[in-house]
Image (cartoon, grey):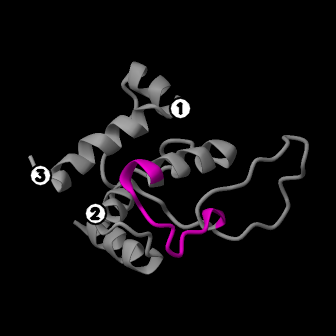
């Protein structure tokens, strides 16, 4: 098996370590696909998202490129803060995007968004 073939299983192993994913795998409620979104499907936000993406980049040797966590994840916040605060729309961040960036070795937002839209049309 070459290194590229090993990316997907290694990525799934890393994803399974996210607390919200571990709980859902016990109940069998989540299926991990390349179209799985880290935020809406896996509930990843705030400090957990930051820590996960740091670990992901280190594990797969992905250069930051034009990655900006605020494009994908909400920051940590207190529940008492008002929900009416205007927020910019977030971009999808899928497992397929993580896999592609790991293959490329760099985060390129436009390329990953394009690849994500192609995969979701399949």
Q: Residues within 10 Å of mark 3 (few under 14, many from 20)?
A: few
Above or below residue 66? Residue 81 is above
Q: Which residue is mark 3?
A: 2
Quarter of the rendering containing residue 71: bottom right
Q: Quadrant of the image for the C terminus?
A: bottom left
Quarter of the rendering containing residue 68: bottom right
In what element is the residue under mark 1?
helix
**Residue stretch in magenta:** 58-70
Q: Do the numbered discs 3 and 1 sit on residues whose CB atoms are within 8 Å?
A: no
Q: Which residue is mark 2?
A: 103
Q: Nearer the viewer, mark 1 or mark 2?
A: 2
- Which residue is at the front of the view, 5 or 3? 3
Give yes or no for residue 56 being in the magenta stretch: no
Whole-angstrom CA distance, mark 1 to mark 2, is 26 Å
Q: Which residue is mark 1?
A: 20
Task: Give the residue at x 70% y 71%.
Answer: 88
In what element is the residue under mark 3?
loop
The tag earlier along the polypeptide, 3 or 1, is: 3
Whole-angstrom CA distance, mark 3 to mark 2, is 12 Å
Residue 85 rendering spot, x and y as whole percentages = 85, 62
Residue 8 is left or right of residue 59, and the answer is left
Residue 30 rendering spot, x and y as whole percentages = 39, 34
In what element is the residue under mark 2?
helix
Q: Do the numbered discs 3 and 2 sit on residues whose CB atoms are within 8 Å?
A: no
What secondary structure is the stretch in magenta mostly built from? loop
Q: Residues within 10 Å of mark 1 (few under 14, many from 20)?
A: some
Task: Give the residue at x 35% y 66%.
Answer: 105
Whole-angstrom CA distance, mark 3 to mark 1, is 30 Å
């Amino acid at each position: 098996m070459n290194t590229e073939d090993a990316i997907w299983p290694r990525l799934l192993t890393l994803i399974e370590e996210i607390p919200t994913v571990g709980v859902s795998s016990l109940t069998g409620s989540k299926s991990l696909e390349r179209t799985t979104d880290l935020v809406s499907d896996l509930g990843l936000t705030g400090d957990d998202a930051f820590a996960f993406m740091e670990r992901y980049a280190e594990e797969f040797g992905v250069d930051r490129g034009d990655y900006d966590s605020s494009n994908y994840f909400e920051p940590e916040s207190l529940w008492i803060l008002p929900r009416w605060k205007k927020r910019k729309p977030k971009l999808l961040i899928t497992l397929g995007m993580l896999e592609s960036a790991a293959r490329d070795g760099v985060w390129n937002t436009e390329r990953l968004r394009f690849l994500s839209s192609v995969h979701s049309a399949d």
